[in-house]
Amino acid sequence: MADLVEPCPICHQERVRPEPVFGLAYRECRSCGFLWRVDRENFPNPNQAYQDQDTEAHVQYLLQQEAGDARRAYYEIQLARLHRYATPPGRLLELGCGTGGLSHAAAEAGWEVLAVDSSPLLCREAERLLGSGRVLQAPMESAPVEGESFDVVMALDFIEHLPQPRILPQRARQWLKKGGVLLLQTPNVRALRRCLQRRRWNQLKPEQHFLFHSASSLGLLFTQEGFEVLCLKTVSGTATAGPLLRAIAFIYGGILSWLGLGNTLFLAARKIH
């Protein structure tokens, strides 16, 4: 396919092509691997797909998931990752908190938490779990969060929903204290599952997921925005139900991670200026 004129928003190279499966819905950088929705900046309401599913039925579905063993194990995994880079006491900001399960687990581990989400229904449930004053209903882009006041920012399965690729590292840098840590999880554009499933890969959702990273593009982005990358790897199977399946997922996830082909990217980065 012929190269397109618009350069990559991350590495600024011009080795850009239509994404092989969805064509002109996405563009893909052949240098750093970044993949983005072509018309993301022209959406009158980029989060409309999420507002449409912001219903009581959807909230009840999420609450049922929260009650399961797999979800609790997932939170334990995420907190174990966090505590390799930062330990309580301290202040933790979670972006895209949903019903508040991860923030609640962090609070129980000794963190002072503030949970942010744009959904009124999800924030209602999060406040029931976390208590008054610990939940902020607002879009991340305009959330009235005090600058340089947090030791940790967590943004799991979040950055792919933002039309602007630099808004998350820029806001996180504003909110973190010097030396503070950001933890991020997002789909891996170079996942083996994407190569095998192609159009059936469940992460390619043009109405919901506006951008995807490779390890190269994600590390480059955060380095450009004033962070030191502490860990950047692919992971798989963290939400698998049952201890046996999680153990199996740990083994094949380790192999995929070594190859850089896991379904999810995990980043830990420290603010340096």
Image (cartoon, helix red, strand yellow):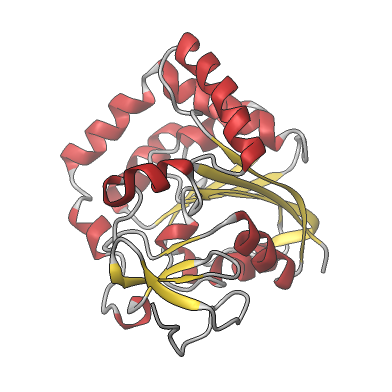
Q: Position of residue 65 (x, y in %)?
A: 33, 27
Q: Work out whether residue 14 or residue 101 is closer to the camera in this orientation and state it.
A: 14
- Tell me residue 45's x, y (percent): 27, 73
**Is 146 situated left or right of 181 in this image?**
left
Considering only vertical position in the picture, is 258 above or below 206?
Answer: above
**Seen from this angle, which residue lies furthest front?**
1
| Residue extending farthest top | 244
Q: Nearer the viewer, residue 21 or 146?
A: 21
Vertical comparison of 159 with 147: above or below: above
Residue farthest to the bottom, as pictured? 5
Left or right of residue 4, residue 80 in this image: right
Q: Is residue 61 visible?
A: yes
Count the marks: how many?
0
* Quadrant the C terminus occupies: bottom right
Toward the viewer: 95 or 25?
Answer: 25
Q: Residue at x 51, y 22 (%)?
A: 249
Q: Is residue 50 above or below residue 162?
A: above
* Near-viewer residue (181 or 27): 27
The image quarter in which residue 255 lies? top right
Residue, x 74% and y 66% (percent of image)?
223
Would you say residue 110 is visible in this rendering? no
Q: Quadrant of the N terminus?
A: bottom left
- Residue 56's spot in the image, x, y percent? 18, 41
| Residue shown at the point (60%, 82%) measured from the top left | 12
x and y percentages locating residue 212 in the rendered image: 47, 60
State left or right for residue 107 relative to residue 192.
right
Relative to 266, does residue 244 appear above or below in the rendering? Answer: above
Q: What residue is shown at x 49% (from left), y 11% (from top)?
A: 243
